[in-house]
Image (cartoon, rainbow, N blue to C red):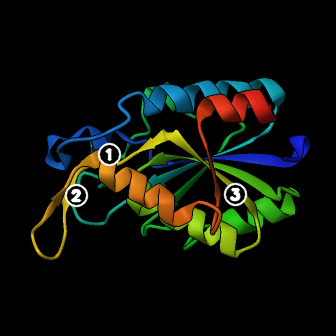
Amino acid sequence: MSEKKMGLIIVDVQKAFDDKKWGERNNLNAEENISKILQLWREKGWSVIHIRHTSDDPNSVFYSMDEGFAIKEIVEPIDEEVILTKKVNSSFIGTNLEEFLKVNGIATVVITGLTTPHCVSTTARMSGNLGFATYLISDATAAFGMKDHNDTYYDAVTIHNISLATLHNEFATILTTEQLINNFL
């Protein structure tokens, strides 16, 4: 990875995901790993982009006037860091993320955040398709258990691992926090 032009994208690390409605989750230390990566990015003075999801629905846990919309304190943005707000799964749709990366000469992105099968995966897929060298950090993202169209339940670990498998070597390179830090930083 090119050291000077790497961007860290932190997707939807918001209080809304603390709501019990989501159910069982894997990688309970994902936010700690994101924070560890974020601290290293800040020390190096590299670009950090915080993405947050919003909903116009007052009943949504992501409604902008509710506490769930807030970014969790453990990764709270500081002054010069970019904050982009989106209404869909991809961090590239309805935001200026692609433009920001290109204008700043950032060709390599590291993606972290919530949740693996939804906004993280969609962002990684678009990042790869747009030509960015994309790294997704497996233990700095998490999934929730869910049911499919046949009402079959899949646990959070299965959802997470299958989501990563569909991305690896196709849209992104999957690394752990330790691999990222030891091999690239």
- Which residue lies at the image location 16% right of the left edge and 76% below the top edge? 149
Q: Secondary structure at mark 2?
A: loop
Q: Which mark is residue 157?
A: 1
Q: Is residue 78 visible?
A: no
Q: Amino acid at mark 1?
A: Val
Q: Secondary structure at mark 1?
A: helix
Q: Amino acid at mark 3?
A: Thr
According to the picture, the residue beneath numbered tag 2 turns out to be: 60
CA distance for labels 1 and 3: 22 Å
Question: Of callouts 1 and 2, which one flags the residue occurring earlier in the amino acid sequence?
Answer: 2
Q: Secondary structure at mark 3?
A: strand
Locate residue 32, reporting x and y percent.
48, 25
Whether residues under marks 1 and 2 lie with C-beta atoms below 8 angstroms apart, the answer is no
Q: Amino acid at mark 2?
A: Ser
Question: Of callouts 3 and 2, which one flags the residue occurring earlier in the amino acid sequence?
Answer: 2
CA distance for labels 3 and 2: 30 Å
Mark 2: few/some/many CA within 10 Å (<14, 14-19, 20+): some
Give the quadrant of residue 124.
Answer: bottom right
In the rendered image, the vertical position of residue 77 relative to residue 9, given as above or below: above
| Quadrant placement of the C terminus | top right
Whether residues under marks 1 and 3 lie with C-beta atoms below 8 angstroms apart, the answer is no
Is label 1 or label 3 in front? 1
Q: Is 102 left or right of 86, judged from the image as shown?
A: right
Mark 3: few/some/many CA within 10 Å (<14, 14-19, 20+): many
Q: Is 80 left or right of 68, judged from the image as shown?
A: right
- Which residue lies at the image location 44% right of the left edge and 67% below the top edge? 89
Give the quadrant of residue 171.
Answer: bottom right
Question: Of callouts 1 and 3, which one flags the residue occurring earlier in the amino acid sequence?
Answer: 3
In the rendered image, the vertical position of residue 130 relative to residue 107, given as above or below: below
Whether residues under marks 3 and 2 lie with C-beta atoms below 8 angstroms apart, the answer is no
Locate residue 112, reporting x and y percent.
55, 45
Q: Is 129 left or right of 102, judged from the image as shown?
A: left
